[in-house]
Amino acid sequence: MAVLFAAALYALGNYNSAYTGTWSWSALIFFTLLTLFVNWLSERMLNKSQKTFMNFVYGATFLRFIFSIFFIVIYLIVNEVVSKYFIFSFGVFYLFFTSFEIYHLHAKLRAEK
């Protein structure tokens, strides 16, 4: 999924450089690394009880939200001009990566039953 987003960012950057920038690429890398980390942790938590795993899923979703807020706050502090294109791409990344992660975590839980 990250590869599809990278291809879309690259295509938008070739079309109009205002759509992408370092922050959009940073957001993509941020969400990709966060998803890989949560996936690694979920594999470890799945070996424990299902109740522990479900608590982990809820906690991971909350932490993703908190880390996303920190990322946006850093963006707002560093940049003088706020780009509506970056905010839109960040929101799209957040929604897709979160829904993708929740779907697959619940699929793993269902497969273990």
Image (cartoon, helix red, strand yellow):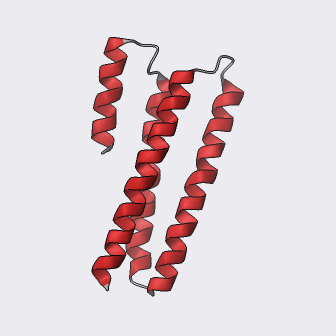
What percent of the width, then of the height, locates residue 21? 47, 21
At 39% from the left and 65% from the top, the residue drawn is: 40
Please state the total of marks drawn on the protein image: 0
At 65% from the left and 16% from the top, the residue drawn is: 81
Position of 52 compared to 72: left or right? left
Which quadrant is home to the C terminus?
bottom left
Location of residue 28 with respect to 12 vertically, above or below:
below
What percent of the width, then of the height, locates residue 67? 60, 49
What percent of the width, then of the height, locates residue 59? 57, 67
Position of 4 compared to 86: left or right? left
At 51% from the left and 82% from the top, the residue drawn is: 52
What percent of the width, then of the height, locates residue 69? 64, 44
Which quadrant is home to the N terminus?
top left
Identify which residue, 40 or 2, lies in the foreground. Answer: 2
Position of 111 compared to 71: left or right? left
Residue 112 location, quadrant? bottom left
At 32% from the left and 78% from the top, the residue drawn is: 110
Residue 39 location, quadrant? bottom left
